[in-house]
Image (cartoon, rainbow, N blue to C red):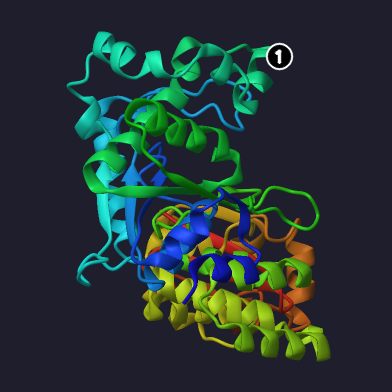
Amino acid sequence: MNFVEELRWRGMLHDIMPGTEELLNKGMVSGYIGFDPTADSLHVGSLAQIMTMIHFQRAGHKPFALVGGATGMVGDPSGKSAERNLLSEDALQHNLAGIRGQLEKFLDFDCGANSARMVNNYDWFKDFSFLNFIRDVGKHITVNYMMAKDSVKNRIGGDTGMSFTEFSYQLVQGYDFYYLWKHHNCALQMGGSDQWGNIVTGTELIRRKDAGEAFAITTQLIKKADGTKFGKTEGGNIWLDPEKTSSYKFYQFWLNTSDEDAKTYVRIFTLFDRETIESLEADQDAAPHLRTLQKALAKDITIRVHGEAEYEKAIKSSEFLFGNTGIEFLNELNDAEVLALFEGVPNFNISLNDLANGIAAVDLLAASTSVFPSKGEAKKMIAGGGVAVNKVKINTADDVYNKDVLINGKYLVAQKGKKNYFLIIAE
């Protein structure tokens, strides 16, 4: 497998330094990508770089995942309009542990010579004094060189300006490359296209400090066809941690991509070969309403990120909302998963005491809650057979509900018609 050619046909390649492809074709190369530890989980925006490392390892090369314990204390200005909050050492260590566990799902850390390795730049920066840094590193890179970088020019010309901390970031990242080149024979740094300036600062430092040679590859930044930011929803980031983004919501994120985006994403985020992808695209073009491409994309990514069991749970959650799975399915979910399933659905809180002696359907839906604006409207729709609680049709307005019917001892699910859901939470 040719790594660069793999990136090309998948539409992932953006920039490549001259001589890089020739180096990769000679034999195993060690290369690295840096990951930002500002949270204890990566999000789908990180998946493109994770996929780059997967392809790199599959091509026979040795991937290093650098988790920036030191650079996380500084903050990368690339693509930022303002300086971000800096993290304490304790917070960073917590975040590093979470990210480490996630990366181990994707990369093989025990496969011989090209086993993946994880490194933390805090290990080589923690005892590096400021005076030693500016003497041993800073003297090799001119201010003119640093000022020419887009990430610097854009901020200095803006309203917020740029702190010395952020200005120094490219030197710190450049030294990461130098350190890995010097001590781990890392000849290649990879990253998103917004990282090109930081990466070539590293290659320049290697050249000026030790007369060495190093190389760079950047990948396309992922954008949605409609111009909105990839990986964001109205609820915020789509995280790889199921505690932050449920498997159902994760699955739905990929399932709901547009046809145009799905054709891009299936190349970037899956390991399907070209023949499989072209077959899926042909099926999609023949019957777009079946969403063959989106389903294959969502299934593949959900299983690789969360596992087969969580994928099945996501499918059952979807079927539940569309009426094909019984209410007992909710007993398989924890509180966070129930709330994620009903995110965006109107919900009401009632007291458990209201259910102690039983409560009539009409009072449950139009007094204790506002599923209906009035008891009269509730009675009318109940009489028409269009209202259900826990997927069981209400026969009369006087039907009584008590604690025994609660799902997980806490929830009732009301429906008006087939698709209008309401979650009632008894506490």
Q: Quadrant of residue 153?
A: top right
Whether residue 405 is situated above or below residue 17 in the rendered picture: below
Residue 302 placement, left or right of 12: left
Q: Residue at x 41, y 49 (%)?
A: 188
Tell me the amino acid under the disc marked 1. Gly
Mark 1, Cα crowd under 10 Å, few <14 / some 14-19 / many 20+, is few
Count of marks, rendered view: 1
* Residue 368 visible to the viewer: no
| Residue sitting at the far front | 211
Observer-nearest of 295 and 181: 181
Observer-nearest of 361 and 169: 169
Observer-nearest of 393 and 280: 280
Whether residue 18 is situated above or below residue 208 in the rendered picture: below
| Residue sitting at the far top | 131
| Residue sitting at the far left | 127
- Residue 424, horizontal then vertical, whole percent: 54, 60
Q: State the SS at label 1.
A: loop
Q: Residue at x 43, y 52 (%)?
A: 244
Residue 49 placement, left or right of 135: right
- Residue 291, horizontal then vertical, whole percent: 72, 82
Residue 354 placement, left or right of 397: left
Residue 176 placement, left or right of 171: left
Q: Residue at x 64, y 71 (%)?
A: 9
Q: Which residue is mark 1?
A: 157
- Residue 272, horizontal then vertical, whole percent: 54, 81
- Residue 117, horizontal then vertical, whole percent: 25, 55
* Residue 45 visible to the viewer: yes
Q: Residue at x 37, y 53 (%)?
A: 31
Whether residue 191 is situated above or below residue 211 in the rendered picture: below
